[in-house]
Amino acid sequence: MSKILIVEDDLSIQALLHDFIQEAGYPVVVAADGVEALAKYSEQTFDLVLLDIMLPKIDGYGVLEFIRQKSDVPVIMLTALDGEENQIRGLDLQADDYITKPFSMPVLLRKITAVLRRSSKQNDIPNTICYKDLTLDLEGYKVYSKEKSIDLTPREFEILRELLTHRGRILTRQNLLQTLWKYEFLGEERIIDTHIKNLRKKLGTADYIKTIRGVGYRIDKENQK
């Protein structure tokens, strides 16, 4: 079951949160100030942090900034500060949600469940794509053919990743430009052809990219010929 760190200096609210969340089945650890929170966070592994902003010693923003330097564990901020600038600051520091006091315990529990569910789905995202003799390391931006490393540029890697992610589907030059460049590269669609040419040269005998004349490019599914 997901373990939750509750950081709250108001002991009555801390106790209420502790009892309600623990009763819902989550293991709970509590901290009453920023220094204690960072100490417990460094000592243990948590799946979610409930974080007050107005804390003694180190405020919630400082705690969140420290956490984000270490991991992307989900953080829900709990605070009486309901100003827009406070919410924006928390979200800019990559808080996953922001709940103002007073709040409903059943609503909070549902938000916890939703944030944990999103986090779980993100953690299920594969770190590699394998296709026949090719392996793409999505985190390291590396490609291997039969365990031999192939040196690709970032753009070549992204094009290959897109084609492998959409196996069996034809991707037009415009598809690739809009996905990878995030805007229309007017009059320069042929830049994709240049990248494909370089990709094929580097992949050598492991080149599986098919040209669909007048349309675009495709990598077939493994059971296709």
Image (cartoon, rainbow, N blue to C red):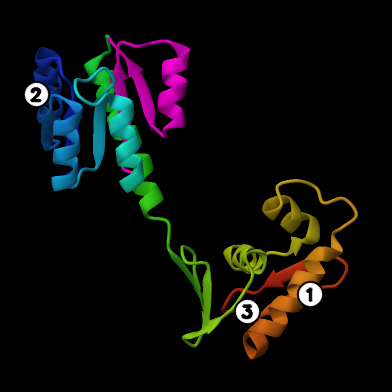
Q: Is residue 89 above or below residue 139?
A: above
**View extreme (right): residue:** 187
Image check: 144 left or right of 155? left
Residue at x 26%, y 27% (from the top left corner): 51
Range drawn in magenta: 73-101
Counting other residues with Cα less than 10 Å from the Cα at mark 2, is it few (<14), some (14-19), or many (20 or more)? Answer: few
Q: Residues within 10 Å of mark 3 (few under 14, many from 20)?
A: few
Q: Earlier in the sequence, mark 2 or mark 1?
A: 2
Mark 3 — residue? Answer: 224
CA gap between label 2 and label 1 equals: 61 Å
- Amino acid bearing label 1: Thr
Nearest the viewer among 167 and 64 is: 64
Closest to the observer, 106 or 188 = 188
- In the rendered structure, does residue 138 fall within the stretch colored magenta? no
Q: Amino acid at mark 3?
A: Gln
Please name the residue shown 57% across and 79% down the image: 223
